[in-house]
Amino acid sequence: MKNMLIAGNWKMNTNVFESQKLVEYILGFMKTNDNLKSRVLVCPPFTSVYTIGQIVKNSELLLGAQNCYFEEKGAFTGEISIPMLEYCGVSHIIIGHSERRSYFKEDDELINKKLLAILEHHLTPILCIGETLDERNQGKTFDVLKNQLDKDLSGVSKEQIDRIVVAYEPVWAIGTGISATREQVVEAHNFLRQLLIDKFGENANSVYILYGGSLSEKNADEILSIENVNGGLIGGASLKGDSFCSIIQTAEKYVV
């Protein structure tokens, strides 16, 4: 059985009004196509999370956040806690995105603390992992992925693993318009699936492994048809309602 999750990461884009318009477009599409089998998630900026939460709370559209901090409250200026997000209706939280790792120097130890805290609150972490272009050119892709998974999933039990979403995002493909080839995606996703099964047993077969990295309506069919691809974490294309909904339609072809 193949499940699908189509997730939009809006990054630092859209004000509250723009977020509302975009989510209303997606909801209109979902209402017209009311028998969707794919799960659909949007991750707006923090300033729009509460407003979007109110709009989607009686719908099938899921609400996510782009980041969090692992402490519940305190003197952590500028941070957002998991209970704050939970109050807004958030069910999923992105962690470990390459932009957080590179621009804000977040390391695997911090990402692991966030992941365990999200699980403790019974929400779903979307753990992003992926190699840089230099690492791929040096033949280190598998080593990088294994190292990130081992560190980021430290302390996770076999019973918890199917509550985690993994997003493979080759860093060199994010926001560049250059997507990994079908062969590269097949290779990476098969490796990740087997790695998870070896580490956590058969429960790992239920883990959603998403692809992210310039996924668009143009290459969605090629990528989403791959056996161990359970959807996408979509950046630029998620900011255009028609493009995002086109990807959802494509995903529907491959849900079993």
Image (cartoon, rainbow, N blue to C red):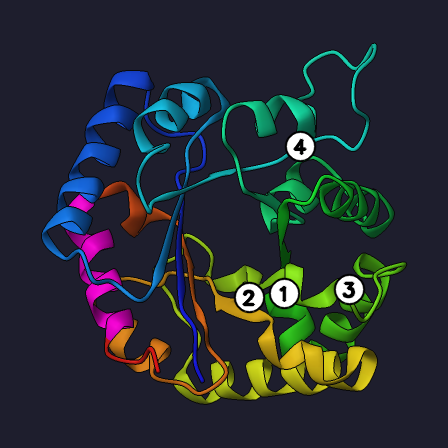
Residue 91 lies in quadrant: top right
Q: Mark 3 and mark 2: span between their CA atoms?
A: 13 Å
Marks 3,2: beta carbons within 8 A: no
**The magenta segment:** 241-252
Q: Position of residue 116 (x, y in %)?
A: 80, 47
* x 32%, y 18%: residue: 16
Q: Residues within 10 Å of mark 2 (few under 14, many from 20)?
A: many
Please give the residue where the numbered disc 2 appears in the rendered image: 170
As shown in the figure, which amino acid type bears the numbered disc 1? Answer: Gly
One can see residue 25 in this view: yes
* x 69%, y 87%: residue: 194
First reached walking from the N terminus: tag 3 or tag 2:
3
Q: Position of residue 96 (x, y in %)?
A: 67, 49
Marks 2,4: beta carbons within 8 A: no
Residue 246 highlighted magenta (yes or no): yes
Please give the residue where the numbered disc 1 appears in the rendered image: 130
First reached walking from the N terminus: tag 3 or tag 1:
1
Q: Mark 4 and mark 1: span between their CA atoms?
A: 20 Å
In the picture, the quarter occupied by the N terminus is bottom left
Please give the residue where the numbered disc 4 appears in the rendered image: 68
Between 243 and 164, the one nearer to me in the picture: 164
As shown in the figure, which amino acid type bears the numbered disc 3? Answer: Gln
- Residue situated furthest front in the rendering: 58
